[in-house]
Image (cartoon, grey):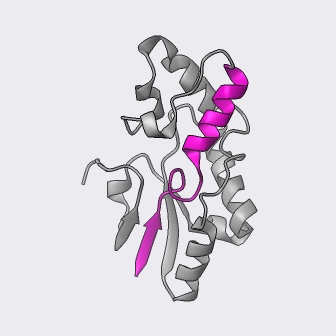
Amino acid sequence: MLILLDQDGVLADFDEGFRRAWRARHPDHPPVEREQRRAFRVRDDYPAERRADVERVYASPGFFRGLEPIEGSIEAVREMLALGFDVRICTAPIDDYQHCVVEKYQWIEHHFGRAFTRRMILSKDKTLVAGDWLVDDNPVVQGAR
């Protein structure tokens, strides 16, 4: 069985990482807390005039590499592998991918080892990736298929 796991929001805590980085950059403007979130994309929970600031936070060097694992996620991957499942990371880079792509690889290498990076699939359209299960925090995964 092939299990595809999203990276951000499933393995890596994007939301908390964003709030931490936002507080450091914008101490006079509190972040939208998890309980207040209404949209899937964090930028959509901020007023239009702040969206460029939001995007600069997660496009900045070190953001993706520095995300903390979601509690239990690393152990869950190891358990699935031990049970014989074929586990792949299926993750979409952000549009401003300059730092994102390499840092996603670095994050996986740090938490699972370099060999595990061969299990990574980067795609803006996850519907084109064949698997038995996709575990994703996005409630509506849309694409060509």
- Residue extent of the magenta highlight: 1-26
Q: Return the residue nearer the eye: 140 or 98.
A: 140
Q: Return the residue nearer the eye: 34 or 127.
A: 34
Q: Is residue 88 visible?
A: yes
Q: Residue furthest front?
A: 35
Residue name at image x 59 percent, y 23 percent: 30
Q: Percent x, y for residue 31? A: 56, 27
Q: Is residue 98 visible?
A: no
Question: In which quarter of the view is residue 57 placed?
Answer: top right
Q: Residue furthest top?
A: 49
How many marks on residues? 0
Q: Return the residue nearer the eye: 85 or 144.
A: 85
Q: Residue furthest left?
A: 145
- On screen, 63 above or below 73? above
Q: Relative to 131, is 6 on the left or the right? A: right
Q: Percent x, y for residue 43? A: 46, 28
Residue name at image x 60 percent, y 17 percent: 29
* Quadrant where the N terminus is found in the figure: bottom left
Q: Return the residue nearer the eye: 118 or 48.
A: 48
Residue name at image x 52 percent, y 80 percent: 80
Question: In which quarter of the view is residue 126 placed?
Answer: bottom left
Residue name at image x 38 percent, y 64 percent: 134
- On screen, 27 above or below 89? above
Q: Percent x, y for residue 123? A: 45, 51
Q: Percent x, y for residue 38? A: 36, 35
